[in-house]
Image (tube, rainbow, N blue to C red):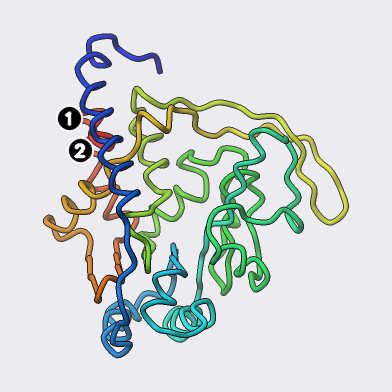
Amino acid sequence: MNLVPTQAVTHLPKAAWSSSKHFVYKQQLSTGGPTNEAVLDAVLNEYEDDSVALVHIGLRDIKTALGTDPYEAILDKLRSRFDSILVPGFTKSFRKTGVFDLEETQPELGAFSGLFFENAEFRTPDPLHSILGEGPYRFESCTFRDTFSPGGCYGQLSKDNVLCLNIGTPWLVSTQLHYIERICNVPYAKTIEIDGELRTNGSTTRIAQQNYKKNNYLYFWNRRGLRDAMVSAGVMDHYSLDGLNVMAVRTGDMQSFLVPRIEADPYYLVT
């Protein structure tokens, strides 16, 4: 997956500009105000026919919006609408430590994931991008040693067109974008193998985990641009409830929308 020099020269300025705009945007983030809870409930009711939800949650904005314990409040709302709840349990430290304990290694991305870790009924044995879950949805036929392969968990999510919900996040959050980069063979990312130890139920197994590698500072997803493009196309819903963002997109629909655009421009996600 080597860069084609002419492509790199052409797209490098656009990618750098996109990343710098996102950095400035992060510094200017401000929390909204109280939200009418009935309106939030009405929005979530739009998706209650979905049995599974993959959620990315921003507890700070939810606390400001609802004025109560944000974890219990949003978890109750999710449980009342979905049979299965899936939550990222990511542990990027494996890249350095080479050690992942399925039962003991705490999620490292987001307060909601850390709290849900205590409630989860299962966790996929991926040392970098594990998925925590509650409910009957499972990944029984997936490969766990190649995170973003079509036969992995994220490939299954896309095949099943699972609902991805962002609640209280300032921008689009979706690990499915890594999966789409993989299947599209984008020139700025490659698949590498990371050796380490998987510890579970008191036993240790040597593993070789395949995952992505790219310059995350230069090739940063144009999250607002992607959100706006998918909203305009009717692929994604975006609500701003007095500053509380709610975004909803189905994983297979996202793939169907993005793949032809990436085929036309391999740098579409990052420019």
Front in this rendered view, residue 55 or 60 = 60
Per the image, the residue denoted by label 2 is: 260
Front in this rendered view, residue 134 or 61 = 61
Residue 132 drawn above or below residue 180: below
Amino acid type assigned to the residue bearing label 2 in the image: Pro
Decide: marks 1, 2 in contact (CB < 8 A)? yes
Front in this rendered view, residue 186 or 139 = 186
Residue 120: % across, % down: 64, 69
Residue 220: % across, % down: 35, 36
The structure residue drawn at horizontal position 67% and vertical position 39%, both measured from the top left corner, is 94
Residue 262 placement, left or right of 112? left
The structure residue drawn at horizontal position 30% and vertical position 71%, both measured from the top left corner, is 32
Residue 81: % across, % down: 42, 83
Residue 56 drawn above or below residue 73: above
The mark found on residue 150 in the picture is: none
Per the image, the residue denoted by label 1 is: 264
Residue 75 placement, left or right of 125? left
